[in-house]
Image (cartoon, grey):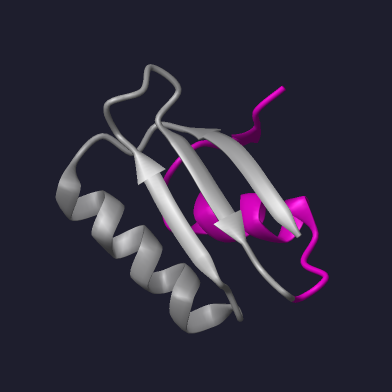
């Protein structure tokens, strides 16, 4: 699964917190947030069959907006 999402993650502190939370909650190969991009793009690469909704719900529970990037 490769998920690409639009978020409102703005700071390095928040970026690190979200990446660490995702890494401890899901099996992932890679996770990144581009806070320099206007869409604050979150990319999640996982060998698991994660659904995009599971990532969206998880990041939302952390207090951030998260939508599928078209």
**Side of 70 where 31 appears, left or right:** left
Counting the numbered discs, the total is 0
Q: Which residues are magenta?
A: 48-70
**Side of 68 where 18 appears, left or right:** left
Work out which quarter of the rendered image holds the C terminus and state it: top right
Task: Return the residue found at the far top.
Answer: 38
Q: Position of residue 10 (x, y in %)?
A: 26, 34
Residue 49 is inside the magenta segment: yes
Q: Residue at x 28, y 63 (%)?
A: 17
Residue 30 is inside the magenta segment: no
User: Looking at this view, is 46 or 63 the one in front?
Assistant: 46
Q: Residue at x 41, y 52 (%)?
A: 32
Q: Position of residue 38 (x, y in %)?
A: 38, 17
Work out which quarter of the rendered image holds the N terminus and state it: bottom right
Q: Residue at x 83, y 70 (%)?
A: 49
User: Looking at this view, is 64 or 34 the one in front?
Assistant: 34
Q: Residue at x 27, y 26 (%)?
A: 36
Q: Position of residue 22 (x, y in %)?
A: 48, 69
Q: Is residue 29 above or below residue 10?
A: below
Q: Is residue 10 above or below residue 32?
A: above
**Side of 1 where 35 appears, left or right:** left
């Amino acid at each position: 699964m490769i998920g690409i999402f639009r978020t409102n993650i703005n700071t390095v502190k928040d970026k690190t917190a979200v990446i660490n939370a995702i890494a401890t909650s899901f099996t992932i190969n890679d996770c990144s947030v581009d806070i320099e991009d206007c869409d604050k793009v979150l990319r999640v690469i996982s060998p698991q069959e994660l659904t995009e909704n599971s990532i969206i719900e998880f990041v939302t529970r952390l207090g951030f907006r998260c939508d599928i990037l078209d």
